[in-house]
Amino acid sequence: MRQLIFSVSPSSWKMRRDTIIVAAASLTQPAFAGFIQPALQALTWKFNGTDLWAPVHLDSAVYHLQSRAGVVTNSLSKRASSSGGYLGCTVLTISDPIESLSSAILDTILAEYEIDDVWSAEQFLDCLFLQYNGTQNGIALSPSVADSLSNHGVEHLFLDSAFNAIGFATTANISIVESSCGLGNGPYVVKLPDCGEGGLSVTPVYALHPDDYEAFMYGSYVHATEPARHQQLHVSLPGTRVPNIIVPSRLSSTKPGAGPLAGLRFGVKDIFHIKGLKTSGGSRAYYETYGYQNYTTETVQLCENAGASLIGKLRTITFALGTPRNGMSVDFHDPWNARGDGYMSTGGSSSGSGAAVTAYEWVDFALGSDTGGSVRFPARFGGVYGYKPTHGIYNLTGILVAIAEQDTPGFLARSPEIFTRVGRVWADGKPLAPSPEVLPRKLLRYDEQAAFTQPVAAEMIEKFFVEMAHILDLSDNHSVNITKRFLDGNVSETASAQTPAVWMNNVYSDLNNVQGWGEIGAPLATAYSEIPGREGAFPPIEPPVNMSWTDGRDPITRARYPESQRRRQVFGDWFNKEILSGNNETCSEYLFAHSYHIPPNTVKTDPAEARYVTGWYDGLYVNYAKTPEIVVPIGQIEYHSKYTNRSEWQPVTVALGVAKGCDLVLFDVVDKLAEAGLLREVMAGVLAYPLT
């Protein structure tokens, strides 16, 4: 017998039937003057190595019960209720079309529950709460259901009032729930009424997972009475080094009618505003200055509306400016990359987003932003899928923007199927070209990439492109030297033609620094100086940001700013016309391909100098041109780590791009390559792929 009965005592919570020790976040006190009234009570216990958590004070629904007609009232476990006990329980939703509930239906649904990483039959099937989603009444229970209940060891059965239990014979104690407010499916704890009287308190159960790679700024939790609002909350357990993130059951969002992302969990880079949460932007001063946000950014809301569960905010380079400084950051430490020896860079600025997807199976995807590679670099270093959309498709309201003309939200994922599923949710209803019936037939290779110092990586990449061309029928292959084409056309319109690296050298930094100071720095400086106790103070800020804001206030930079805006526009227009143009049949004339791969470097342990982003580098051109690009993992190669003094494994990735507005072509390409087996889901943790 698996019965999970928690007894309340002044000193501890203990299992009646098992040896699991359950700790309480706070203890209930009598409700009269002189006693503390706790704001939060929670049960925590461990099962099969996973910590579980139930916020019995914060998030409990109470249901009134009635005995079923024609059946003698049976008290609900007097033994448990005599001490205010709790019982593990499973909520399961039955939906139309249905005339009667059979054991086949019940057993099929419970078999599907086995995939969940929070729910387990051993913990939560002593009790079953059946609710109904439909328009019928009097739904009968087939006699075979009694056998199913017995086989699963169900001792307490709570039924939605839509079910007809008259004449149904079972050894389980049955009570009818007078009304239902629509619980999510999955694991719960229930507080049993004393001697069958009073209400049934029902509380969802969550898993607690330690943030060992320090990817999260903090965990979050859906507000109990206002689902559109979140609360900042994570749990610290005795003997742990890092906070634990509260992770809901995948079943909780999978009721009938749930969206295409139901059952998935995601985190969000902490430059996105979310209703009920504070935004730090990677800055202690910003976090201290501004309050809880009262709205949620568009792309976050798209994911939630589609059924995905937000579990927290993820770390970011301060105001998305640059890359990790490898231990030199002042306000918040850089996240860790789980791959290889654990000391490779995560890349940035969406460093926490990359770290979370790379490290944790319980994070399915993560949102970041891309101004000059800030989604694609973490995807590259983590060996995961990353998406930078066409610029201007998604609303930037509620995002701390680095460069308005280039910034776009994006996301990362380990699974190609989840990657394209999220992408299509985002694309729905947006002004993007529809998926063409025919994919691009021309492959355009970027030929200015530095020679690989790892021959095995070069061989892997070349083999991938050959196989990709075969699968996609890319029979017309070309290469492009962007610098040469730029010079040949004298796009710079100078007496002596200039390379894009020279002509565009100040563009990124001018736009970033002037806008960063004007949109974030100046308002923050004013607001921070008005905080009681901070009167007249300038906000303490990371050295690279301070340098950026200083340059953004410099008269020389500000005088150059309009010309930098013009050059960005000129380059983008040229790129979209001469390099990656559209096509009426295939949407994009070419599938543009290159690789961001570099050998493992020492940047995680070698301090990085304080500087802001300037100059020209591989991949920046698609930000100037506003075109979409994805990173996809293709394999892993061995390298020798000087930190672990042994062979480790590093992921290998490539990048694929198309013309502006043809984002759906990229998702079609991923689907086709995954169907052919060329692209696969990568693992979370040290290795991207199993060793064979």
Image (cartoon, grey):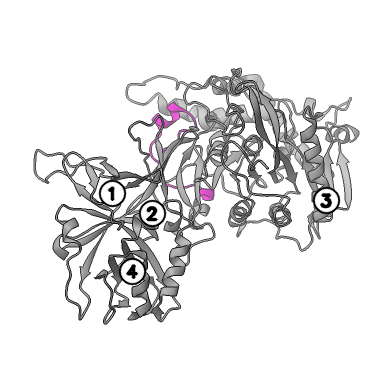
Q: Whole-percent x and y of residue 506?
A: 71, 25
Name the kind of residue labelled 4 in the image: Ser
Q: Which amino acid type corresponds to the residue marked 3 in the rendered image?
A: Ala
Q: Is residue 285 magenta?
A: yes
Residue marked by disc 2: 227
Is disc 2 surrounded by few (<14), some (14 to 19) or many (20+) residues within 10 Å?
few
Of the two numbered discs 1 and 3 on the same chain, state the one appearing first in sequence: 1
Q: Which residue is mark 3?
A: 469
Which residue is pictured at 37% across the width and 56% down the height? 122
The mark that comes first in sequence, 3 or 2, is: 2
Rounded to the nearest whole Å, what is the CA distance between mark 4 and mark 2?
Answer: 36 Å
* Amino acid found under the numbered disc labelled 1: Asp
Count of residue discs: 4
Q: Which mark is residue 368?
A: none
**Label 4 CA crowd tier, 10 Å (few <14, some 14–19, many 20+):** few
Q: Secondary structure at mark 4?
A: helix
The span picked out in magenta is 278-300
> Distance from label 4 to label 3 (Cα)?
57 Å
**Where residue 253 appears, x then y in whole percent?**
44, 58
Q: Label 1: which residue?
A: 18
Q: Amino acid at mark 2?
A: Pro
Residue to which mark 4 is pinned:
150
